[in-house]
Amino acid sequence: MSSEKISSARVYADVSEDSIIIYQIKGTDSGQPDISSGVGSKIRSIGPDDDLYESRFNKKSVEVDLSTMLTKLRPATSGVPSQLNSNLNALIYLGARNDIYKIKTFSSVLNKTSSSFKHFGYDGGIFAGIGIVSVNPTVTNDNTSLEYDGIVFQKGIGVFITIDNASVGLTLGFDNLIGGNSINWIYNNKPYLGLTIGIANF
């Protein structure tokens, strides 16, 4: 993690509730914090005279998430117009992530200042998972008379943005229907766009 104000430096930031402790990093390659170098501050009380005023921290990491697509936009195909589907699904996402944390200070009408962390992040990666789709004569070119909920294996790529604790992404995906009707399903391995939200981080 690095802090940037006048110049940049690699540091370890330990944040808990309303406090932050900054540790210098031992050497250039170890990545281990020097425990004896810790300098702490109350986040809420950081003001223009503090070294951490308006500081920015960058953190690069590998992201592993459990996510779900709120909706899928499937282009028109085989005489069926474009479709918006919101069937139940879940996916595991793996990506390269960059988080930016900035200390922002605000002044009240009483001329009192208060600081807090503002968080913005973005990442890109790949995903895979399973979902449910409707299978019927329309989406199989009348090659089945059955109407049922089929299971698909879904995979693709995506990009996400995170503001504070909310994460939303745009994905380009491909579904493969599991079962004998996969060769008849008009959307099998066809691209679609998905609106995705993160559920949990690992």
Image (spheres, rainbow, N blue to C red):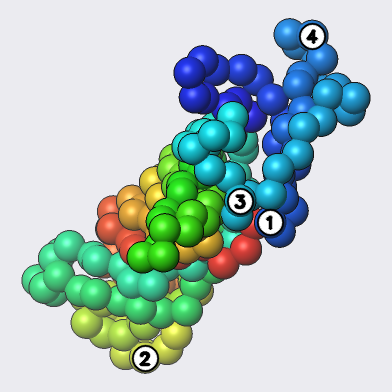
Residue type at numbered disc 2:
Glu
Which element type, helix, strand or loop, lies under badge 1? loop
Tag 1 or tag 3, which sits nearer the N-term? 1
- Is residue 27 shown to the viewer in this render? yes
Q: Position of residue 182 (x, y in %)?
A: 40, 66
Residue that carries the numbered disc 2 in the rendered image: 147
Tag 3 or tag 2, which sits nearer the N-term? 3
Callout 4 environment at 10 Å: few (<14), some (14 to 19), or many (20+)?
few
Q: Quadrant of the N terminus?
A: top right
Callout 1 environment at 10 Å: few (<14), some (14 to 19), or many (20+)?
few
Q: Position of residue 13 (x, y in %)?
A: 70, 36
Task: Tell me what residue is drawn at x 42 percent, y 58 percent.
Answer: 111
Residue type at numbered disc 3:
Ser
Which element type, helix, strand or loop, lies under badge 3? helix
Indicate whether 34 appears above or below 81.
Answer: above
Q: CA distance from mark 4 to mark 3?
A: 31 Å
Q: Position of residue 196 (x, y in %)?
A: 41, 63
Closer to the camera, 201 or 83? 201
Tag 3 or tag 4, which sits nearer the N-term? 4
Q: CA distance from mark 1 to mark 4?
A: 29 Å
Q: Which mark is residue 27?
A: 4
Callout 3 environment at 10 Å: few (<14), some (14 to 19), or many (20+)?
some
Q: CA distance from mark 2 to mark 4?
A: 64 Å
Residue that carries the numbered disc 3 in the rendered image: 45
Is residue 70 rendered to the left or right of residue 48? left
- Is residue 174 shown to the viewer in this render? no
Q: Are marks 2 and 1 in contact (CB under 8 Å)?
A: no
Q: CA distance from mark 2 to mark 3?
A: 62 Å
Residue that carries the numbered disc 1 in the rendered image: 18
Indicate whether 28 appears above or below 95.
Answer: above
Residue type at numbered disc 1:
Asp
